[in-house]
């Protein structure tokens, strides 16, 4: 089965579990709206690709790890879009959850998705129960305080913030959790997989900054120019567009070099290259730099 | 060590872990504000009392289960107090989290507390790793969709709602999780402990309804009369004050009878009686009924 099929099926099973008869139907709708249809699913793809590179001997657990990471990512998007943060009315090319369902249900949908992420992991740990605690530790580290994505979002509420600290927590932490959890789900040592996640997280953030300055809102599915409007620190703002593109290329090269020796290394490197081109197409860069010259 | 000391120490350890240098300090402050000083800590006390009645052979895991339940309760209070729900400015006799730290940090504090609840559990499962998955399943069931406290809060956003369904999810689910998780943390079968949690959850909700109508805001530490103001379903509204007090007495009696045979049964029954008197003092009932006559 293709990785994307495995991810979508595993997400569908998790979400269906929260839709049992007898629950509040509008919250169920808001949760489904937050997860389907999805974006590129890059974090769960990365998690599953690392699990495969490590042998993928417990496919149900690998899929649950990937699902858990994606549900937490979706939860963070729902809460980041709230009026008290970005007040974004669109997401993935359609209404954001709070715009479609109201603020109350958006808060609760995010909460329910966080709980569901851990629940899905627990339910899948029957074959390899000893892997559950380390997986939970990795994933909660990538999401919670003091260094996970919740901490990253909280840096926007601080009077002083370093760009590195902010971006590492807000974006990098969940990429790092994705590669490390992929290894742990397959019973492998997580440590050698940390660097790949770190590089990719930084690359993704740099790409997001470039696209926020240069992107087309129809392609991104969300408003552009938000970072500047919200006075958020950004690599593109600090380095200029040319510098930000050079930084992105450097980070992608770092990620490719960071793939540990394993039988799936070539496939992983190909995935990184493909994702880099999807995020920041070479043709777009050429156009942008020509226009800026 | 006294149960309350164990609970406060375990909560303090969990919260300290989220305050490591390098994290966002204002969010750390909001999280601490949400947890300390606490309320009656009735849910973790119940969890620990059941664990003790079942032998408490892994005290660290029992404390983590109690801590996890309390952190999730605190998270739900922080989010319930938000402007889009109750818009409560006070909680436990002082400023609510959103009133003290702003709405953004209140949303994030709730999120971080949910993550921390699962993280604390995972970290404590070293001695008895096989207990982690069932514990997680019990606790996430009590919190998430479709029947946990998040679902309960979501019933307030539905056009039609049954009082039983609403209260069972909003309040009862976490009490049931507390008794069952207490048993599971001690390696015991959770099923016989479900009924005790169910009865207590209903009793607690009935007490809350009575106190919302009759209570003194200085004693409760939060505004009274909120249910009526927010058009929330309530036993006191449906049955009248006398009926609600009779219901409460019936539910407490049910809880006392539901304590399964075990060596700590007498202590547990005493805890239930003491908690009932704390929640709805006999003297208060007499005064209320005299005033209503």
Image (cartoon, coloured by chain):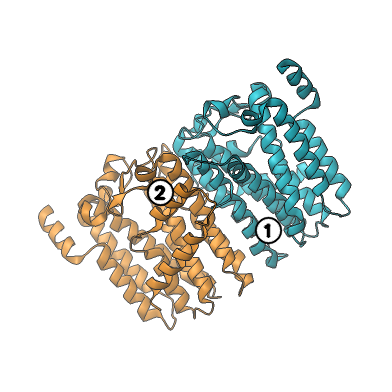
Chain colours: A orange, B cyan
Q: Secondary structure at mark 1?
A: loop
- Residue at the spot 35% in from the left edge and 45% down from the top edge: A100
Task: Tell me which chain the residue with mark 1 is part of.
Answer: B
Residue A151 place in picture, x, y as percent: 47, 48
Q: Secondary structure at mark 2?
A: helix
Within 10 angstroms of label 1, few (less than 14), some, or many (20 or more) residues? many
Image quadrant assignment for residue B38: top right
- Residue at the spot 73% in from the left edge and 15% down from the top edge: B291
Q: Real-space Cα distance between discs 1 and 2?
A: 30 Å
Query: Split into 4 quadrants, where in the image is the C terminus of chain B?
Result: top right
Q: Specify whether A163 is left or right of B260.
A: left
Q: Specify whether B150 is left or right of A290.
A: right
Residue B128 place in picture, x, y as percent: 72, 65
Q: Specify whether B244 is left or right of A171.
A: right
- Residue at the spot 74% in from the left edge and 35% down from the top edge: B248
Q: Is residue B8 visible?
A: no
Task: Give above or below for A84 relative to B116.
Answer: above
Same chain for labels 1 and 2? Say yes or no: no
Residue A29 place in picture, x, y as percent: 42, 51
Q: Specify whether B105 is left or right of B63.
A: left
Task: Give above or below for A207 relative to B228.
Answer: below
Residue A105 place in picture, x, y as percent: 45, 43
Within 10 angstroms of label 2, few (less than 14), some, or many (20 or more) residues? many
Residue indicated by mark 1: B124
Residue indicated by mark 2: A78
Q: Is residue B246 visible?
A: yes
Task: Tell me which chain the residue with mark 2 is part of.
Answer: A
């Amino acid at each position: 089965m293709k990785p994307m099929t495995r991810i979508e099926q595993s997400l569908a099973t998790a979400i269906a579990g929260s839709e049992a008869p007898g629950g509040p139907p509008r919250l169920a709708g808001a949760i489904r709206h937050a997860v389907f249809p999805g974006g590129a699913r890059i974090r769960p793809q990365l998690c599953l690709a690392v699990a495969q590179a490590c042998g993928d001997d417990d496919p149900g657990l690998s899929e649950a790890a990937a699902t858990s990471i994606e549900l937490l990512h979706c939860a963070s998007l729902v809460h980041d879009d709230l009026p008290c943060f970005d007040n974004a009315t669109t997401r993935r090319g359609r209404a954001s959850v709070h715009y479609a369902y109201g603020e109350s249900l958006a808060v609760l949908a995010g909460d329910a998705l966080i709980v569901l992420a851990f629940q899905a992991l627990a339910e899948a740990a029957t074959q390899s129960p000893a892997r559950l605690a380390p997986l939970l530790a990795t994933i909660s580290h990538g999401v919670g305080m003091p260094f996970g994505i919740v901490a990253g979002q909280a840096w926007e509420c601080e009077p002083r913030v370093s760009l590195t600290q902010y971006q590492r927590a807000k974006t990098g932490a969940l990429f790092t959790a994705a590669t490390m959890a992929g290894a742990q789900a397959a019973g492998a040592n997580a440590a050698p997989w940390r660097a790949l996640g770190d590089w990719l997280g930084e690359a993704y953030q740099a790409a997001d900054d470039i696209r926020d300055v240069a992107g087309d809102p129809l392609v991104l599915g969300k408003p552009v120019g938000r970072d500047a409007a919200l006075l958020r620190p950004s690599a593109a703002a600090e380095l200029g567009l040319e510098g930000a593109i050079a930084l992105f290329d450097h980070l992608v090269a770092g990620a490719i070099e960071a793939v540990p020796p394993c039988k799936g290394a070539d496939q992983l490197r190909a995935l990184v290259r493909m994702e880099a081109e999807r995020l920041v197409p070479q043709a777009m860069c050429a156009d942008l730099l020509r226009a800026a010259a």
